Image (cartoon, rainbow, N blue to C red):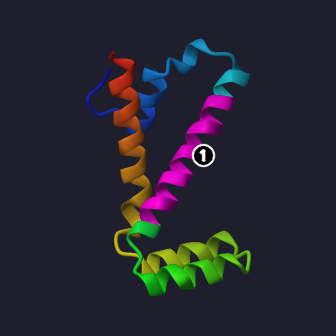
């Protein structure tokens, strides 16, 4: 494996996705996407103060579009831009650690 591979490349290799059928790959990718989304959201909420958490809950109650969510998070949450990358890196590290066992 190249030292310049992305976390996604490392995940694909660690999970041996190439050996799976297209349908199995899709299920695994959907599960990973769900983990990344939940992990990122959790990380973002952890970085919010109480007032921002309350305002975020109120925003969610309005069923906002993606652009409104992004605007809120980028404006109100410290390090929002790096939350997804940190989550992906953490999940990648966890999967790679398990796959080496």
Residue 78, relative to residue 86: is it above or below?
below
Q: Is residue 3 magenta?
A: no
Image location (x, y in percent) of residue 5: 34, 32
Q: Residues within 10 Å of mark 1 (few under 14, many from 20)?
A: few
Image location (x, y in percent) of residue 73: 49, 75
**Residue that protrudes farthest toward the front in the picture:** 50
Query: Image quarter for residue 23?
Result: top right
Left or right of residue 32, residue 44 in this image? left
Q: How many marks?
A: 1
Query: Which residue shows up at 51% across the image and 61% down it?
Result: 41
Return the residue nearer the eye: 37 or 48: 48
The residue stretch that appears in magenta = 27-44
Image location (x, y in percent) of residue 92: 39, 36
Image location (x, y in percent) of residue 97: 33, 26
Left or right of residue 47, residue 65 in this image? right
**Residue that protrudes farthest toward the top in the picture:** 19
**Residue that protrudes farthest toward the left in the picture:** 3
Query: Image quarter for residue 57?
Result: bottom right
Query: Which residue shows up at 58% across the image and 44% down it?
Result: 33
Residue at numbered disc 1: 34
Query: Which residue shows up at 54% across the image and 53% down it?
Result: 38
Residue 58, relative to residue 65: is it above or below?
below
Q: Is residue 33 magenta?
A: yes
């Amino acid at each position: 494996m190249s030292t310049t591979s992305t976390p996604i490349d490392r995940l694909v290799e660690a999970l041996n996705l190439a050996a799976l059928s297209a349908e199995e790959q899709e299920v695994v990718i959907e599960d990973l996407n769900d983990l990344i989304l939940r992990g990122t959201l959790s990380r973002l909420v952890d970085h919010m103060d109480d007032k921002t958490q309350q305002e975020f809950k109120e925003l969610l109650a309005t069923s906002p579009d993606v652009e409104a969510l992004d605007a809120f998070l980028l404006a109100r949450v410290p390090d929002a831009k790096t939350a997804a990358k940190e989550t992906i890196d953490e999940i990648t590290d966890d999967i790679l650690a398990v796959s080496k066992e």
